[in-house]
């Protein structure tokens, strides 16, 4: 079994859901960090969803990890980190949406297990 630490980013996320990461086939993934930064001059609100609708087995739901979370000007929000981890299965996607156009930078740290 190979373990690979990875980092994914997306810049200027806006009002359309941005797929920040998709779990590869035959790979289990552990999210170990997810930070979203406000890059505009007004407060924003963000949603983070784990979309499992393309799974081939198990629950095929799309669920919120956080919804309508405010991020003040010059701040960031740590959605996943510290003691909290999130497990993703092959085909799961991580999506981020803001209520303001081109307003959020996203950084994800993860461990892929193949």
Image (spheres, helix red, strand yellow):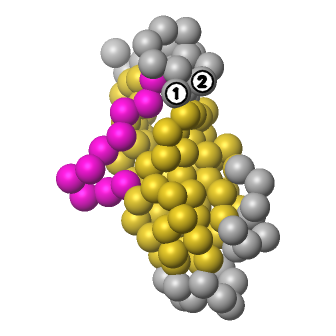
Decide if residue 99 is on the left or right side of residue 101: left
The residue lying at 67 percent from left, 44 percent from top is: 19
| Residue at x-position 46% and y-position 23% | 89
The label on residue 80 is none
Q: Can you see residue 58?
A: yes
Which of the pair 1/17 is nearer the observer?
17
Which stretch appears magenta?
80-89
Query: Disc 2 on helix, strand or loop?
Result: loop
Most foreground residue, 81 or 17:
17
Magenta segment includes 93: no
Task: Report crowding for label 2: few under 14, some 14 to 19, many 20 or more residues within 10 A (C-alpha).
Answer: some
The Cα atoms of the two marked residues, 1 and 2, are separated by 5 Å
Circle 1/circle 2 CB separation < 8 Å: yes
Furthest-left residue in this view: 83
Q: Which mark is residue 61?
A: 1
Q: Secondary structure at mark 1?
A: loop
> In the picture shown, does residue 38 fall above or below 33?
below
Query: Is residue 87 shown in magenta?
Result: yes
Give the quadrant of residue 53: top right
Residue 107 appears left or right of 41: left
Label 2: which residue? 53
Residue ID at (25%, 58%): 82
Give the percent coordinates (x, y) of residue 54.
62, 20
Give the quarter of the figure containing the N terminus.
Answer: top left
Whether residue 24 is visible: no
């Amino acid at each position: 079994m190979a373990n690979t630490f990875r980092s994914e980013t997306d810049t200027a996320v806006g009002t359309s859901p941005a797929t920040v990461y998709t779990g590869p086939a035959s790979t289990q993934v552990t999210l170990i960090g997810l930070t979203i930064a406000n890059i505009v001059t007004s407060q924003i609100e963000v949603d983070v969803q784990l979309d499992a609708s393309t799974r081939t087995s198990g629950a095929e739901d799309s669920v919120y990890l956080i919804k309508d979370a405010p991020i003040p000007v010059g701040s960031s929000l740590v959605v996943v980190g510290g003691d909290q981890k999130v497990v993703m299965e092959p085909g799961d996607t991580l999506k981020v949406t803001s209520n303001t156009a081109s307003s959020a930078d996203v950084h994800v740290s993860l461990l892929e297990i193949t």
